[in-house]
Amino acid sequence: MFDLDNTLHDATPHIFPHINRSMTAYLREHLLLDEAGASDLRVRYWHRYGATLLGLMRHHGTDPDHFLRATHQFPELRRMVVRERAALATIRRLPGRKILFSNSPAHYAHAVLDILGLTPLFDAVYAIEQVRYQPKPLPGGFRRLISNERVIPRRAVMVDDSLPNLRVARLLGMKTVWVSALPRAPDYVTVKVTSVRQLPRVLDRLGLAR
């Protein structure tokens, strides 16, 4: 299973700032907050719940589909996506079924996969709508995917840039790959790589056949 943003492509330079601005603007408009208050609430809900949306749903009755449509508009998405070099060739070489598990909305996840040329390589795409708005690292989203796709956790691998997400995946019995340039990994990380390009080199350590 693969995360999307900052795992299969680099969302930090263009996409994340755009989403943050859009979410802050949404909170300003719909909760009648000033810029600082809206930005602070966005960050607080993200840290507390793993996604700003979940805090808005729990505390303000926000319609999730309206929020996702309003905050994930990308007229120039193709220009904003920073590709992970050789990701297409790398993912194609990996054994087993590939499932995308992202906290992003479905229209965005599919659009990015199309831009990256990865759509034909994935057997299923789970965006936040498909897990009933239970974003990673909440266990509920993982369990829904596992049940729907009949995943056997001990035979599955979660590839993600987020340690909280990997911690839950490990607790559920999966092997974990942390995509990070940081030097040290916690014990619930099976393998650390700096790029998905390195995945074919670590298949043996993950117990996967080449």
Image (spheres, grey):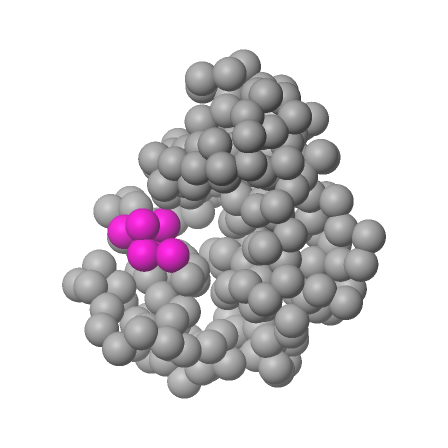
Against 19, is 54 above or below? above
Q: Nearer the viewer, residue 71 or 29?
A: 29
Residue lying at 70% horizontally and 58% vertically, measured from the top left: 112
Residue lying at 31% horizontally and 60% vertically, measured from the top left: 175
Find residue 86 and report its horizontal and vertical position in percent.
62, 82
* Quadrant of residue 202 within the rendered picture: bottom left
Horizontal arrangement in the rendering, residue 96 relative to residue 143 (left or right): right
Residue lying at 50% horizontally and 56% vertically, measured from the top left: 3
Residue 16, visible in the rendered structure = yes
* Quadrant of residue 194 within the rendered picture: bottom left
| Quarter of the picture holding the C terminus | bottom left
Find residue 149 and report its horizontal and vertical position in percent.
52, 43
The residue lying furthest to the top in this view is 61
Residue numbers of the magenta segment: 162-167
Residue 126, visible in the rendered structure = no
Residue lying at 57% horizontally and 79% vertically, measured from the top left: 90
Residue 164 on the magenta segment:
yes
Find residue 197 and report its horizontal and vertical position in percent.
51, 81
Residue 66 on the magenta segment:
no
Find residue 43 and report its horizontal and vertical position in percent.
43, 41
Total tally of numbered discs in the picture: 0
Q: Nearer the viewer, residue 188 or 34?
A: 34
The residue lying furthest to the left in this view is 187
Q: Name the dominant secondary structure of the magenta segment.
A: helix
